[in-house]
Amino acid sequence: MSDNIEKKIIKTIKIDVDKCHGCRACELICSAVHAIPKYSSNNPARSRIRIIRDPMRDIYVPVFAGEYTVAECAGRDVYTIDGKEYDECSFCRASCPSRDEFKEPDSGLPLKCDMCEEEDEPLCVKWCTVDALIVEEREEEVEEPDEVQEQEELELGLGSLADKYGLDKLMDTVARLSEKE
Ligand code: SF4
Ligand code: SF4
């Protein structure tokens, strides 16, 4: 067994689609808390949660930004909800080259929900007054990556971002983010 097993509190945000009424307060606060400087602006295009809205059918589906992917999927499924067809991409969490969702609008860099790691709690949950978003916590044993593995993962991630966006754009964005510190 690995020496790097640790107990961690894992946070999950449960989404109750039936309670969401599409107010987009979650998008607003997410973009504001991640603005640089914090709360200096709000722009739902920078949010790490987005609401798929179809007011005529009373359909609102919150989707959290997930992992970055270098290539789009080769196939598509189609969902039918209350008679309306949705491309599988509608509900996908990935920041993907085939679409603009979950990309920082100025730099094009991928966005991913970080569970508001610098805050006491996920702010989209706090701002959702109808409890469509609820945090659940559980304790799990997880394997901590060792330093070599972490370094390899970091280099892999930076390498793929540099390939995609160019080193200059990547460095500019890192410099801009570091001003936040
Ligand atoms: S704040 Fe809650 S109700 Fe409003 S759009 Fe977001 S998830 Fe839906
Ligand atoms: S948990 Fe925080 S980072 Fe994630 S979507 Fe909600 S407000 Fe944004």
Image: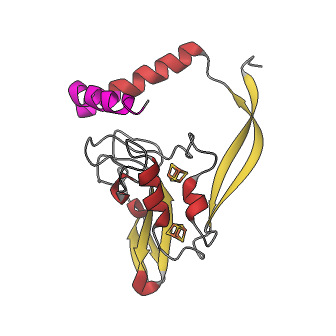
Q: Residue furthest bottom?
A: 56
Residue lying at 47% horizontally and 73% vertically, measured from the top left:
23
Residue 95 in view, yes or no = yes
Give the residue drawn at x 60%, y 60%: 126
Magenta: predominant secondary structure element? helix
- Measured as percent of width and height from the top left, residue 55 is found at 42, 82
How far across and down, in percent of the image, does residue 106 sit? 25, 45
Up/down of 51 relative to 101, above or below: below
Residue at screen point 47% across, 54% down: 30
Position of 70 with respect to 92 (left or right) is: left
Q: Position of residue 62 (x, y in %)?
A: 50, 64
Residue 73 part of the magenta segment: no
**Dividing the image into 4 quarters, which one contains the C terminus?**
top left
In depth, the one of 38 and 75 nearer the eye is 38
Q: Position of residue 128 (x, y in %)?
A: 57, 66
Q: Is residue 93 visible?
A: no
The image's colour scheme reads secondary structure
Is residue 7 found left or right of 79 in the rendered image?
right
Residue 164 is inside the magenta segment: yes
Quadrant housing the N terminus:
top right
- Residue stretch rendered in magenta on the structure: 160-180
